Image (tube, grey):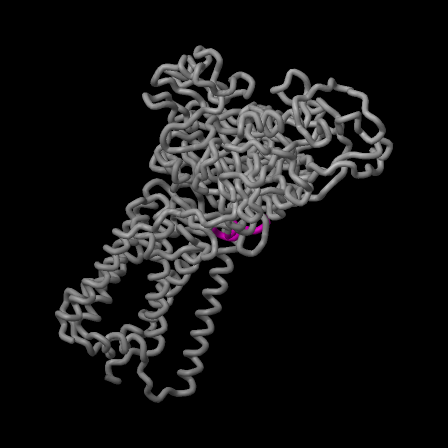
Amino acid sequence: MKIWQRAFMLTVVPAATALAALLHQPDFPQPTPHHFTKIDYNGNPLPHWSGPWACVCDQRTGLLWEVKTDSETIHDGLWTYSWYQENDGEFVAASSNPGTPTNGLGRDTFNIGTPNNGDCYFEDERCDTADLIRRTRKEQLCGEQNWRLPTTGELHSLVFTDAKAGQPKIDTAYFPKTKRGDYWTSEQGESLQKVYKHLRRGALAVSFVDGQSITIPHRNAAFVRLVTENSKSCH
Amino acid sequence: MTTNRKSLRWILLHSGAGLAVICSLLTGLRIASLARPQVARFEELLPQGQVIELHFASAVAITLIVLIYIAYRLIGGRRAAGHAQVLQWPGWHRAIIRAGYPLLLLSLVSGWLLFAGGARGVRDLHYLAAFGVLVYLALHAGLYLARWGRQSLLRIALPYWGPRSLRRWMVGSTLLVFSVLLFTGVWSATREQSHLPLTVTHIPLLHPEHPPMAIDGRTDEPQWQGAAPITVYTDGGANFDEGETEVTLRALSNGEEFYLAVRWRDDTESLAHLPLMKTERGWQVQQQGFHNFDETRHYEDKFAVLLSSSCTFGAAGTTHLGRKPLKDRPANWHGKGYHYSSNGQLHDLWHWKAVRTNDMFLADDNFIGPPDQARPGERRYTAGYQQDGKESGAYVMNWQWYKPGVILPKRLPPDPKQLAALQSAGGDASEWVIPWFDYKPYSPKQDANYPEGTVMPSVIYNSNRFEGDRADVRARGYWQDGYWHLELARKLVTGSPLDVPINDGTCLWVSAFDRAQVAHTRHTRAIRLNFAPENSR
């Protein structure tokens, strides 16, 4: 190779490399596929890093989940609810007053649990699970009407053990405003233990402090995340 | 060709110098890319990761090689080199080689001056010298390669292999071992003995004549009078005056708590943290880099203190520069890098924010640990930089979801007069924080009361302050006459697994942010806490 050829190579190769580096800027990060999909208020899917969103579809289970907010609407994550079910499974307008007498099983003639013993802004009286279900169905959150309390197994499917320090055991990037506390399930009639033993039976909740199930009295004020299946936006 | 060969010692010195200079240049340019966007444009050619320690190690190597070379030439190398000069060159190439010496010297002197403490303009001089060395390398190596091709490579790689006496072997081997030991010793001394000592003056837990320490940013308590200050030159940040500011530190301890008083120059008090502005289309977040997590205009002032039992260069070895220093983790948006621990060790990070935490009388108690797992739902990956847990309390931003375009605020003030102070003068610190219940949930009807051009704060306190682990560091700052004054306090031992106990030998690093999200100033040498004995006062 002649001198001019070597000189050409020694000039062109570094210059071309520098020019290529200058012209080719690295791509910005892109989202990776995930089993959760954000769903907007009207039931339309959103890209992973978009928002705001009102529901999350879990592709693994086909369940559509309510997402909590800090908007002071009925979906605010701060609101708590006592466990209450009207007409043995039919969730309709609450008619009972706080302190409605129940029998020893936490059940009156038609209803189960304790009405109006949680804290929220959206009811004239205090709140129970039937209130949130009734209102969420009425507003057709994410285009759905069949909102209900999740089973223990369904709620456990959201437990995320790799949560950051001090955060609830859930993927907070999809489920913000989740509290480190107990979330009601639909399963009730379980025997209460220890200090609650005298109340005989309560309902199951999942604690997002540690991801474990716990039976607590219906009268307790716990958090709620509703779920629906066979939804149009999650199947 | 054999007659063209260099001696083994020349080849060792030349190769060592070449490798160290190239390493120093590449790592130095990566460091420079933090504050020089024109260098960042070539980021794909630059190394990533823990380059800071590598940069200092190469500087030590170059310095020692230069000294050894001078000794070599003085003792007899000049004669040997003269004999070995077989390739004939015109005088101008000799001039290029000669020009390399002062450039290298300038680079070394400016670099060590920066290491010693820095001063205005030295960073620029170091940067220019580095570019001079880069040009020198290109001309020096390029001309040899162009003129002699492979022959020149063989000449600098393969030594003359003639008969040598046992004595020469012994002397050569001894010199080589001595050089390696010298490098190891000097590097070890540089790493272990270069810290800036900060005396932690002991004060009594209770003093009959002294008031209790108030964390208010004002060091007017008599206890502070006995604290010896040190001043640390920091640079490389966004804004400030040429990106530089000097930070003065004083420290006290009463055996239970550690107090740190900080003062740094910042010509402007920046409190407008990503403010919202009403436009023709709706509310917009004022930003020019926040979308890529590198805001440098519409942001609050901040200050950070990193504490660690490790005193390793690069903020206890947590600084990993580059867009993607972790192959199996997401890249960062700004290309600057991540903080994380690569050996599992946990480091403490106190992050005081002029708006988001100052009214809580707290610094955000964070930590730097091993790189977090990638979380698909989070647009920003922060590697090892994480927050301690909290029981309650927080600030939230006044938008339902951030977008570069129009956003919907979470809350609006019921009366437009509540924003009056912010529309012209800018308002004081308290007006840039929204107490949750002073505003109401957003409604289009209420929104109609706000004309275009209205400016609204974006930081909402939804309770008074953090509670729990994240609230371990009390802090309060105030700005006056071009300086921030900040007072921080924390228990020496909190008991939290996410906090580093503070004791004699703990190292810390400080960084100031002038309306910048991540572009902070930095310093080279760790500040090492030296707890004074209790009876020293």
In the image, B141 versus B150, the foreground residue is B150
- Is residue A194 magenta-colored? no
Image-based side of A204 in relation to B100, left or right? right
Q: Quadrant of the C terminus of chain B?
A: top right
Image-based side of B491 in relation to B231, left or right? right
The magenta-colored residue range is B308-317
Residue at x 73%, y 18% (from the top left corner): A97
Q: Position of residue A113 (x, y in %)?
A: 75, 28
Q: Residue furthest bottom?
A: B163
Residue at x 52%, y 29% (from the top left corner): B396
Q: Is residue A119 visible?
A: yes
Residue at x 68%, y 25% (from the top left corner): A128
In the image, A153 versus A15, the foreground residue is A153
Residue at x 57%, y 30% (from the top left corner): B394
Image-based side of B199 in relation to B324, left or right? right
Q: Is residue B425 above or below residue B205?
A: above
